Image (cartoon, rainbow, N blue to C red):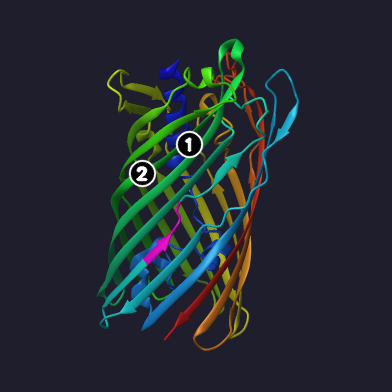
Amino acid sequence: MRVKFFVILLSLILSNAVIYGGGFQVNEHGARVTAMGGAFAGLANDASALYFNAAGITQLRGFNAMLGTTLIFPSTSFRGPSPAVDEVKMVKQMFYPSHIYLTYQITDKLHAGVGMNNPFGLGTKWDDDYVGRFVAIETVLKTYAFYPTVAYQVLDNLSLSASLVYNAATVKIRRKAAVGTLGEAQILLEGTAKPSFGYNLGFLWKPINDLSVGLTYRSSAKYEFEGTATPSSDQPQVVGLLPSGDIVAKFNQPNQIVVGLAYQATDKLVVTSDFQYIGWSSYDSLKVDFVNPAYADLASPKEYKNTFIIRFGGEYQYSDDLAFRGGLLYDNNPTPDERLDPSLPDSDRLGLTLGAGYQVTESFNVGFSYMFLRFSERTVTDSKVNYSGTGYAPLNGVYNSTANLFGFSFSYNF
């Protein structure tokens, strides 16, 4: 029994800890970029380029700063388990991943900067008595990335960049367990990842005046989560039957490549597009190491697939002070139907975006964005997720999700 519960808990940690191209990834790290559908790798001409394509900071002059946040309001419902059609809704929550970017022009060609944001940082929460409580009740992930950067203008129309990325993360998992005829108990797991490192590379080329091409490579990074499982129950004899103690899980975060184009269609209109590829097939299984040598190390299949995101955006400079923006994106998720569960009710997504920017003074700019995400309805008929606390029952059913995102960024340059 102890081994089974440890595997479930670690599966929950890692299935939520590093989902790229869907899931718990947050790409909304700047109001202007978000308003343009996230298509910015080929444009990259404000301080948020530190994340989206740092080679672009060679276009900036002097000192530039940007500070902002995105308010995320997800909504999910589940109908099932099949053949039942009872509907349960996820508890409403708000998340606010934030960003800070600083850039400085050292010489005419050499630029430096530092960025900080939350590339992951969402969660799910269901009622304590819902049907999937033995799989997941509450899952919360908080991640932090810090990346000092240098960029150099090699030619008048070509810039390169490199960033060292420092990653940190915490996770909280809460679920219930059935203990024979004694009833149910709660298991709480809280874990922290050891600091890990990666790197980003950027490329920005302007073959002609009105066209620019951007490329960003984000490396994989090695994570090691350390957590403690803590059972609780009104009945002391139940606690002794449930797992407790230290566990460790290691995995490699998949790498990403983003290719972007930006075209100055008119004096006032620029249009952009990005293609983002995520190598998720490298995450084919979850490996768990037990600190207590009494337990054998285990592996659980995940079978994730490579994913992609397609983005389109535009910005219209209505006046010297006011710009309007809009965009569209399609985000392909990595999770196979049979591995889908309530801790991460993911699906392919279609996003519609809009926003505006206003130049308050010569040095101060305010940006606003809104994004609506519609997740494809996802029907699971061959689930390998067991929602029964005592036997086996596949968690088949229908998931529906949407999300509303409101972004704000404040920029200052001198």
SS state under label 1: loop
Is 315 one of the magenta-colored residues? no
**Is residue 319 positioned above or below 222 on the image?**
below
**Is residue 42 positioned above or below 253 on the image?**
below
Q: Quadrant of residue 82?
A: top right
Q: Which mark is residue 334?
A: 1
Q: Which mark is residue 167?
A: none
Confirm whether residue 135 shows in the render.
Answer: no
How far apart marks 2 and 1 lie (CA) works out to: 23 Å
| Circle 2 residue | 193
SS state under label 2: strand
Picture residue at 47% right of the left edge, 31% below the top: 230
Q: Which residues are magenta?
A: 115-119
Residue 37 x, y percent position in the rendering: 55, 59
Q: In this view of the protein, which residue sits in the foreground, 207 or 329? A: 329
Horizontal side of residue 165 vs 185, given as left or right: left
